[in-house]
Amino acid sequence: MKILLAISEVHPFSKTGGLADMAGALGKALAHAGHEVRIVTPLYRGIREKFPAMRRVEWQFNLPLGAKWEQGNLWALELEKGLTVYFIEHPGFFDRPGIYQENNISYADNAARFIFFSKCVAQLARYSPWRPDVVHVHDWQSALVPVLMLHQKRAEGWGNPPPTCLTIHNLAYQGIFPAGAFALTNLPAEFFTPDGAEFYKQLNCLKAGIVFADAITTVSPRYAREITTESLGCGLDDRLRQRRKQLFGILNGVDYGEWNTTKNSFLPHAYTVTRLAGKAANKLALQKELGLPQRKDAPLFGTISRLAEQKGVDIELGALEEMLSSDIQFILLGSGSSVFERGYQKLAKRFPDKVAVRVGYDEGLAHRIEAACDFYLMPSQFEPCGLNQMYSLRYGTVPVVRATGGLDDSVIDFTQDTMRANGIKFQEYSARALAKGIRKALAIYGQPELFRRFRQNAMRADFSWEQTVGEYLRAYDAAKVFSAGQDSQTAGRVP
Ligand code: ADP
């Protein structure tokens, strides 16, 4: 199958979160399964210098963007057999210090930037001699692609365009812009209605994708159910309920080629489930690196996160406040809201022997924290999938998570299965409930046999992408069936 993946960030070229990890890993896994994959993404600042093997493709974009015309170039890098990444070059839009924002402020022209990107994707899908069998778009930044393609089919005679699939990585980010931004799509007004791209008189890019994509996936089965409810539907639950038959929850996999404890240049000491001495050595090394007392016996907790409300940082600060009177250590790596950054930094100042905080983004340190800690805290308010709890499992770092979205789908609590338990879950969104989870962790830590079992179960859990690929192929099939069904209805999808 020929699959075109359109996504606004791809590891190792650009990354702000799990979206980038998923794009790179899904592309690789599909290619390993024998499919032909092309990923298309913007050419952000610095990528070309880091990947000099990239070559310019003879292809020029010249596309209307409202009343103006915008030009772009195309670059390509073959990553491995069956997997090529296309980069859209438009220096005005993408050669900037940030991907979506700078100093916590979104770029004012994000609508223009990503509508242009979406138009480039639709054009590639239509005119590239390599004709994709499916176009798979991700999140609001490329969610307009299905409607752009539908319009080209209806009004411009694009016979038989490939079916489209939209993956929602986080429903909370919808790409909502003032109504005037709709003009940048150059679509007819009939698409800007409450049954189309309009959301309370504004343009909502993700909603357009939900209405017009042939199939929709999200990144865990539980989150797929949650987003059809009013409490987690972010105002789009009714639209998602309408598309329930084409909505699939597929848990993200982990790229174990990157996230492993045996062949990993970020880790000072390798270890395996049967040889855990390296894990203890990593703990001592990280305590030293971050200026904490080197104590083998002190239970070490960690978090690596965007510091946003979604991630439960407020209840984490509350729970730590309560729990730091116990003999524990805690390490945080994160960046985001300055209020939260300051909150953690204050905690580190008050408890210099117990708390180490690093504000910033550091891939190597993220691996070292996962490898060194005994427990990983992830108390998210909501969590579409979450990757760090799965990385923690593989690194033998027992996750303490709130039972929501992908966290609930990937962690097994003692109350669910005493023999297979690999983590601790709590339900209520409160500092007290998290503190109770931490107390349970300490109780388990105090029983070496039990702790060993949790750790072994964790390290043996398997979230490899190979298992996940089949589920995406089923979603692509569903997209094909839905699109064919739409064709057979004379009216088609009326927006
Ligand atoms: P989200 O996509 O909502 O941010 P995920 O858990 O799905 O959350 O993915 C987060 C990814 O970003 C993980 O790979 C995590 O290790 C990484 N990450 C987050 N913050 C940092 C940071 N400050 N430094 C390094 N990696 C980080």
Image: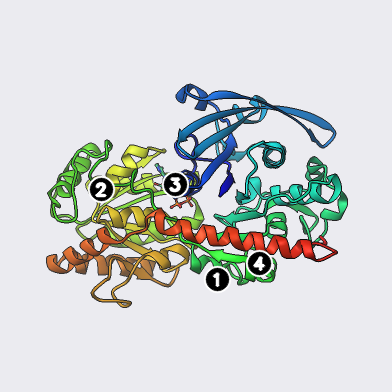
Asked whether 143 or 351 is in front, the reply is 143
Cα separation between marks 1 and 4: 10 Å
Q: With respect to residue 88, does 148 lie above or below?
A: below
Q: Is residue 356 left or right of residue 211?
A: left
**Label 1 is placed on what type of residue?**
Arg
Between the C-alphas of marks 2 and 4, the distance is: 39 Å
What's the CA distance linking mark 4 and mark 3? 26 Å
At horizontal 43% and vertical 44% (from top left) the residue drawn is 342
Q: CA distance from mark 1 to mark 2?
A: 33 Å
The mark lying in front, picked from 4 and 3, is 3
Q: Is residue 373 above or below residue 237?
A: above
Residue 206 shown left or right of residue 45 in the figure: right
Q: Are marks 1 and 2 in contact (CB under 8 Å)?
A: no
Q: Residue at x 20, y 56 (%)?
A: 299
Task: Give the class, few, some or many, for how many residues have Cα within 10 Å of label 3's Cα (few <14, many ≥20).
Answer: many
- The residue singled out by tag 3 in the image is 25
Q: Nearer the viewer, residue 275 or 152?
A: 152
Give the distance between the C-alpha atoms of the residues marked 2 and 3, in whole angstroms: 21 Å
| Residue 432: image location, x then y, percent | 37, 69
Which residue position holds label 4?
Answer: 240
Is ligand 1 closer than 8 angstroms to the Cβ of mark 1?
Answer: no
128, above or below 155, in the image: above
Q: In the rendered structure, find residue 225 and report the number of the disc placed on it.
A: 1
Mark found first going from the N terminus, 1 or 2: 1
Q: Secondary structure at mark 1?
A: helix
Can you tell which quarter of the image residue 485 is in? bottom right
Residue where numbered disc 2 is placed: 371
Q: As shown in the figure, which amino acid type bears the numbered disc 2?
A: Ala
**Mark 3 sits near ligand 1, with its Cβ under 8 Å away:** no
Place of residue 461 in the rendered image (x, y in percent of width and height, measured from the top left): 30, 61
